Image: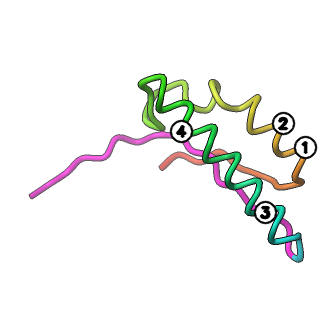
Amino acid sequence: MKARIPKHREFVIAFPEGSDEKRNEEAWTKLNQILEDYKKQGKSVYTPTFIEDCQAQVDALKEEYGFTYTIELR
């Protein structure tokens, strides 16, 4: 069986070494909530505008929690 997964862009999140694990978990929970809210709109990470639609929210969390991210094509 073959399956074709469409190419898409995604956020790759990185927390600094030595950062507080509890805060990192809190940030992951909030990042996952952004994704869940996005799915409730009937969209997915394969939606062509996924990055643009979520970037402001991710940037706000980046400022609050101090992680970095790159946007990669998968």
- Distance from the alpha carbon under mark 3 to that under mark 1: 13 Å
The disc at residue 63 is 1
Could you tell me how far apart the alpha carbons at marks 4 and 2 are, in whole angstroms? Answer: 17 Å
Per the image, the residue denoted by label 2 is 60
Describe residue 35's horizontal placement relative to residue 30 as left or right.
left
Q: Position of residue 34 (x, y in %)?
A: 63, 37
Residue at the spot 80% in from the left edge and 63% down from the top edge: 15
The span picked out in magenta is 1-17
Q: Name the disc covering residue 36, or none.
A: 4
How many discs mark residues in the rendered view? 4
**Residue 48 drawn above or below residue 32:** above
Q: In whole angstroms, how far apart are the C-alphas of marks 4 and 1?
A: 21 Å
> On the image, numbered disc 3 is attached to which residue?
24
Check if mark 4's residue and mark 2's residue have beta carbons within 8 Å: no
Residue at 67% x, 52% y is: 29
Q: Amino acid at mark 2?
A: Ala
- Which image quadrant is residue 6 in? top left
Identity, as a three-letter code, of the amino acid under mark 4: Glu
Upstream in the sequence, badge 4 or badge 2? 4
Where the N terminus falls, by quadrant?
A: bottom left
Residue located farthest toward the left when viewing the structure as drawn = 1
* Point 90% across, 43% down: residue: 63
